[in-house]
Amino acid sequence: MARIDLNVPFAQKDDAKRLGARWDGDRKVWYVPDGVNPGAFGRWLPALPDINVRASNYFIAQSETHCWKCRELTQVFGFILPSGHEALEPDDEEDDRDVWYRHDEPTILNYVTELLPAVANRIKTMTRHYRVDFSKTTGSSYWMNHCEACGMKQGDFELFCEPDGAFFPMDEQAASQIVLQTFSEPFGGCADTSYGDHLFDSMRRT
Ligand SMILES: [Zn+2]
């Protein structure tokens, strides 16, 4: 298990020490040593990402597109959650609270704003061109593809929301250009979901 680093304000360092936290002098950070229950350190634990979609496993989808700027062919990436994933949605009865709904069809995610650290690390091992960046179109930041040749942002609208976009196949031939890699580990993120016939069965599994 990864070491848990803490956000301890200087004024509270003695409290953290008394509870068993250790100081890493190289990285200048307090952490929970192995074998110590992190429960006591709740107020200093790093904030977990706000998630609205989760699954016990997931796919990273890979496709290609021509960069709108330099026209070079570039790899692009996205996330697909299998049937059985859950999404946080308003309760039918009390709409001021959200509940987790199980979905029996897969979804393709877009405008991903948060990822569990383990998932973020996964995709970072596959590409360095998929990372959080600011979009002038949406006025917000999200996990975005970038051209491998010129570095230009490749926004989610063109890739995921426009018919014939890299992740919006209109026929089986187009869907077969999308390669799916399965990860049998939990997914959590904050993103928009998209349902409908995405021709998942025609996408290639590695
Ligand atoms: Zn380019």
Image (cartoon, helix red, strand yellow):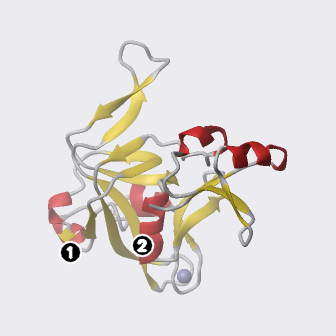
Residue annotated with mark 1: 206
x and y percentages locating residue 101 in the rendered image: 31, 31
Is 142 above or below relative to 64? above
- Between residue 121 and residue 22, name the one nearer to us: 22
Q: Is mark 2 within 8 Å of ligand 1?
A: no
- Of helix, strand and loop, which one carries label 1? loop
Q: Residues within 10 Å of mark 2 (few under 14, many from 20)?
A: many
x and y percentages locating residue 84 in the rendered image: 23, 43
Is 101 above or below relative to 6? above
Is 103 above or below relative to 144? above
Q: Quadrant of ligand 1?
A: bottom right
Could you tell whether 155 is left or right of 188 in the image?
Answer: right
Residue at the image point whose x is 53% and y is 50% from the top:
36
Give the number of the mark in front: 1 or 2: 1
Which quadrant is home to the C terminus?
bottom left
Could you tell whether 118 is left or right of 57 in the image?
Answer: right
x and y percentages locating residue 176 in the rendered image: 20, 71
Contact between marks 1 and 2 (CB within 8 A): the answer is no
Amino acid type, residue under disc 2 in the picture: Val
Q: Which mark is residue 181?
A: none
Q: Residues within 10 Å of mark 1 (few under 14, many from 20)?
A: few
- Between residue 181 and residue 65, name the one nearer to us: 181
Q: Quadrant of residue 169?
A: bottom left
Amino acid type, residue under disc 1 in the picture: Thr
Which quadrant is home to the N terminus?
bottom left
Residue annotated with mark 2: 76
Precedes in sequence: disc 1 or disc 2 = 2
